[in-house]
Image (tube, helix red, strand yellow):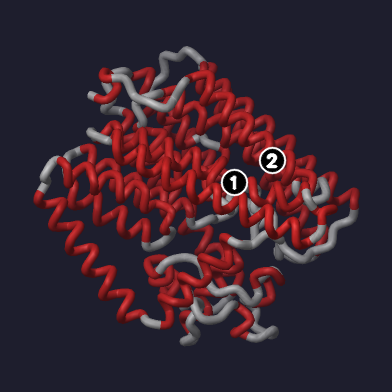
Amino acid sequence: MNRMVRYGWMIVVALAGAVFVTWLRAAWVGTVKVDDVVLTASQRLVIGGGLGAAFALAGWAYWQALQSEHSITIKSLLPLTLLLHGVAAGALPCTSNDLFSNLAYARMLHVGLDPYLAGPSALGAADPFGQWVGAIWWHRPMVYGPAWAALLRLLGAVRDPWVALWVFKGMSWFAACGIVALSYRYCVRLSNPADGVWRFILVVWNPVLLWEVTAQAHNDGVVALVVLVGLLAAWRGRAWAALALWGVASAIKPVLLPLLGLYGCWRLRERDWSAIAMLGIGGGAVWLAVVWWGAGAQGWFAAQGIMWQDRHFVAFSLPHLVHLLTWSCGIGTQTMLHAVVVAAQWCGMWLLAADCLRQTRSFAQVIHSTLLFLLLSLLLLMPWFQHWYLVWLLPLALMVPRWDLARLVAALSIVAVLQYASILALPRAVPTVVSVLTLNGVGLWWWWRVRGWRLSSRETA
């Protein structure tokens, strides 16, 4: 058996083990609800340890596959890749409550309630969709944009919660398979076949994509799919299509605005009139949509602010780390230090954005600068970070000129799933501190080692 294929089968085995753990957990506690479920110490150890062992095996096999010499073709890896995502799709919700919040928002939209003005509590305690939502999200309005609300409105027509759960997971699986198909389409056209195989595996065998999108059904998979379609359109010179697609992605999660802004500024420098016209049309459409949306738009913006200032939830960010490490100093000192760190982060983010704009003079630099900005902002500059946000980086890692930066995304993905599994086995403050220190430590050490700040003239071409 080819070594690359052997590593793929190891990931299959690891995913099957993780899927089994999710069903075991549901059988133990008698519900698929994730939040507010009390587990005994032995149950936490078995569930957290089982997922940790599965993720460790998957991460090791994934990393070995990225470093193995091979003579295999991408086409021969497609059946195994689809099997990986098929196995992962069988998992029940276990490490995230987001799926249930989305189902509740879909139900609200269907019955005429505005999820931007009220949380799932508006459905009432007896509603079967609301019963699965965690207490911390019970009164929280939706933070996702109007493009996502339009998709949820269609899902809201499914009245049975269990059917809706699997329909939603099916949508996530479909998004993951779309990423597989588009990655294949791009990689088979690369001049270096070996590089194509490595880049293909880096994205489609990525443990964060497999677990957080295909298994746990985060909507970041849909965002990544739309971004990847836009990148391929830009790669073919269709700037107007790329801008339109990234606008849609930003209307799901506004975190993709850096890509939209960098690419738009580059096309402005190049005097690309079709792109300039698209930017003008898009800006006008956004303004009209916000005016028409009215109170809903105000509710969405308010929800963003509440989420970014939350210090009392596991956010895996530097401000949250400061909040945890200064608990003995009193609430006044904690609040002050948190505000100082957040303010410093915002200043750093704007300075980094200005430098990226200054140096971006080609499509390769757009990809490099966007990946640079998102990497540093996710690890150091954002007051809120969850591990599945790394899915946003995968389309960029697929096409970034510097392979060492793509491998950094792979390394962070392995660390992320391992650290998130530790939440189930340990008190939350412990894995939060360890996770922030580990992710930032790995990222900064790698950055120092590869000197990944600038592209060479050859890489820019």
Q: Nearer the viewer, residue 267 or 175?
A: 267
Secondary structure type for disc 2: helix
Q: Amino acid at mark 2?
A: Ser
State how far apart marks 1 and 2 are (Cα). 10 Å
Is 303 on the left or on the right of 177, as rendered? Answer: right
Q: Amino acid at mark 1?
A: His
**Contact flag, marks 1 and 2 (Cβ < 8 Å):** yes
Residue 18: name its quadrant: top right
Is 14 on the left or on the right of 412, as rendered? Answer: right
Q: Is residue 42 visible?
A: yes
Residue 428 x %, y %: 78, 51
Residue 156 x %, y %: 48, 76
Is 359 on the left or on the right of 27, as rendered? Answer: left
Q: Is residue 214 visible?
A: no
Task: Name the residue rendered at 50%, 33% in the picture.
Answer: 409
Tell me if residue 303 comes above or below residue 258 in the rendering.
below
Task: Name the residue rendered at 36%, 31% in the picture.
Answer: 400
Residue 354: name its quadrant: top left
User: Which residue in the protein does label 1 denote?
Assistant: 387
User: Which residue in the protein does label 2 denote?
Assistant: 435
